[in-house]
Image (spheres, grey):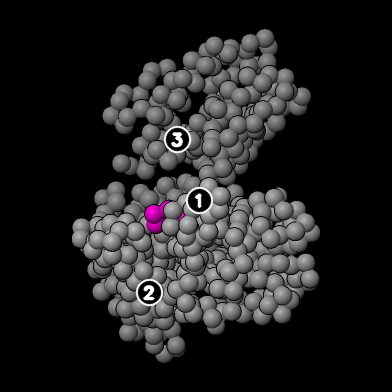
Amino acid sequence: MDLKDLYRDVILDHNKNPRNFGKLEPCDTSADGHNPLCGDRLTLTLRLEGDTVSDIRFEGKGCAISTASASLMTEAIKGLDERAITALSDVVHRTLTSSTDAAVPEGLGKLAALSGVREYPARVKCASLCWHTLAAALAHRGGSAAVSTE
Amino acid sequence: MNLIEQATAHYDVERVRQDFPILSTTVRGKRLAFLDTAASSQRPASVIEAIVHYERHLHANVHRGVYELSQKATDAFEAARERVRGFLNARSTREVIFTRGTTESINLVAQSWGRSLQPGDEILISWMEHHANIVPWQMACERSGAILRVIPIDRRGELDLAAFHRLLSPKTRLVAITQVSNSLGTVVPLAEIITAARRNGSLVLVDGAQAVAHQHIDVQALDCDFYAFSSHKLYGPTGMGVLWAREAVLADMPPWQGGGDMIRTVSFEKTTYNELPYRFEAGTPNISGAVGLAAAIDYLESLDIDKVHAHEQALLHYATDALRAIPGLQIIGEATHKAGVISFTLEQVHPHDLGTILDSEGVAVRAGHHCAMPVMEFFGVPATARASFGCYTNREDVDQLIGALHRALEVFG
């Protein structure tokens, strides 16, 4: 197993230069995510047009996997409606938890860079934190929600 | 030659390593550099064999059967208690209670002795406690209306002793304090704390989890009231621990868990309780765990704890110097007196990423909050990486860590 399979250039780039970093004020919905095991914290703020995420930002502190995953997620879901987001989220989760010899599912785009995480079960929570947080933000629209991976 | 060099000159770590079967395994195709002894130590073959011997030849329930096997198991179990008594220099085996570990030992005190707490009483702990020496007291305070006070620490990870003396008051019923911080490595000046607490009329509980395998422990010399430790941090099995307590204090404490073994007679009208220490040991105990713990104590004493201590101190200095030379690396916890525990952060790399990269190089370190979230908050870090040493740690382990840290810098360069 090569370390470069986990820390691909895309991951390292998004960790160093996270996209959509910051806070949307005002926003339509927001959520805090926390991974108590490693102390990762993440806040998502979203603007919605109907069912569609028109803008999203994240801020927080975390490891490279969690930061890059959040950064990649914000890029991937901007402009998608809730159904498309749920479908994408399912594919991401399947990718992160699939066996290491299974083929990486289609349709992930840049998010496929996260597929190396499945070789490191202890790190899956780092990559999935932002997706859980996103689901909470969409479920508690108009308010604020908090999720924890524990 | 200084004192440490003199002592380590007669310590053959390579010989010691041969006693630990797991150290010859490889991880991810690399030599294992096991630097997580503070979380759990590895076991020597003699401990593994003692447990297997017990399971194969001696097992039956203790304190019950009149048949030979039960007597043999009881003898082995009680011999382990006597072994622990000698190891701690306790007055009597009546003071040695077997538990599941340090956490359960502290919970026993918090739930049993803690029942005597009154509203307004104070429990004094320190900022660098493990969660196991925070949460049981918070729960006891919630139940009783007592108040939890916290001795602050400074940026070097030293206890603020002036603040300790100020916080000590007539309301202080108990000082519950660690001997060695698991997250910072700080060795706490127990003598000063215990002297002041006793003069104040407060009891003292010492969390010895991180100390017991690394220095001589003498509970009479320490003059504390409770001493808690775990077997698995002492080269023994998991699920086994000890609470030592002064007999006069134990005598006034109510039982905490009810069941078999802790009773003398049971009727629906009135139950009478067993004598010490059995009153605090409800249910069938971890018999093979006790046997394993006794074997672990035998093993550690065969190495000479003073020599182990000197060896670990030499490694601490060697590793501290090597780590300081790495750009962007910051050691968290720089107390004057430290045990073989080094917490650190690397500016460019999150501790969790560091843990994964070090793992890929065969280096096992803990990355996280070390069950000491208040310490992490104090230093403003979400987590640290922590390397910790034991009797089998050698310079090659440290060198492998340093090499792996350079690899991390390359990946994140």
Pointer 1 residue: B267
Please say whether residue B171 is visible from this viewpoint: yes
Q: Amino acid at mark 2?
A: Arg
Residue depicted at x 56% and y 39%: A35
Q: Secondary structure at mark 2?
A: helix
Callout 3 touching callout 1 (CB < 8 Å): no
Q: Is residue B283 magenta?
A: yes
Question: From the viewer's perspective, is residue A60 above or below residue B284?
Answer: above
The label number, if any, that marks residue B166 in the structure image: none
The secondary structure type at the circle numbered 3 is helix
Asked whether the viewer can see residue B129, the reply is no
Q: Residue furthest left?
A: B57
Where the N terminus of chain B falls, by quadrant? bottom left
Classify residue B21 as left or right of residue A61: left
- The amino acid at mark 1 is Ser
* x, y percent for residue B75: 31, 68
Q: Position of residue B329 (x, y in %)?
A: 53, 60
- The answer to whether marks 2 and 3 sit on the same chain is no
Q: How far across and down, in percent of the image, does residue B282 sit?
A: 46, 55
Residue A124 has which mark? 3
Number of the label disc, if any, that sits on residue B83: 2
Mark 1, chain letter? Answer: B
- Distance of mark 3 from mark 1, alpha carbons? 54 Å
Chain ID, mark 3 = A
